[in-house]
Amino acid sequence: MLHAPARPDPEAVDTFLAQVGPAAGAEYPLLVASLRHMGGALSRPSAVEDAVCSRDARYFMESVGIMPAPPVAEAVEQATRHLYTAMAPYGTGRTMVNIHGTPGDEQDIARAWTPEVYARLRHDKSVYDPDNLLRYGHAVTPA
């Protein structure tokens, strides 16, 4: 998630294009890389308590790559890592859980929520799934 004013920072756009634009070359493994404008209804707080975070981000960065076999999979992982590392200075440090990508450790998964919401989700998990049966992918760990 990029946190930026109504118009993206020219330096952020230059950094993005340096990673995924023509200079990336014909062998670039990502099929899609985009910056999408956010705001509008998504930026408004919900009338009821929810776990949707990153409402303050003005732009959403997304990338898609197909990982059919080890050489291509490694290239996709490396390109994704380089893109997100290069764009980190312009971001919020958070992500959206349904578009998070490959889940990492607990700290990585927690980036989808504010610390307060993550603590509430962990508490709820310990109440409703104390044996951690739902534990794969981007699952929250019990408190």
Image (cartoon, rainbow, N blue to C red):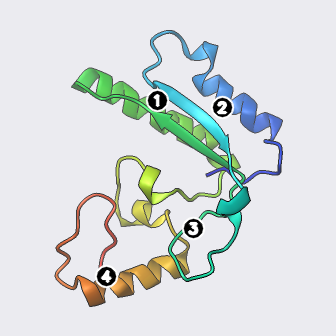
Residue drawn at the location 64% of the way across and 57% of the way down:
92
Which residue is at 82% across, 51% downward?
Answer: 5
Q: Determine which residue is flagged by label 2.
A: 16
Q: Using a 10 Å C-alpha cutoff, classify the residue at mark 3 as few (fewer than 14 neighbours), some (14 to 19) or many (20 or more).
A: many
Residue at left offset 35%, top offset 55%: 104
Q: Earlier in the sequence, mark 2 or mark 4?
A: 2
Nearer to me, 126 or 104 = 126
Residue 125, label in figure: 4
| Badge 3 or badge 4: first in the primary sequence | 3
Query: Closest to the observer: 60 or 75?
Result: 60
Q: Earlier in the sequence, mark 4 or mark 1?
A: 1
Question: Closer to us: mark 2 or mark 4?
Answer: 4
**Where does the image place residue 99, in percent across and percent down from the top left?**
45, 50
**Residue that mark 1 sits on:** 79
Comparing marks 3 and 2, which lies closer to the viewer?
3
Query: Alpha carbon of mark 2 to alpha carbon of mark 4: how far?
Result: 37 Å
Q: CA distance from mark 3 to mark 4?
A: 18 Å
Give the quarter of the image for residue 61: top right
Q: Looking at the picture, does residue 45 appear above or below residue 68? A: below
* Circle 4 crowding by C-alpha within 10 Å: few under 14, some 14–19, many from 20: some
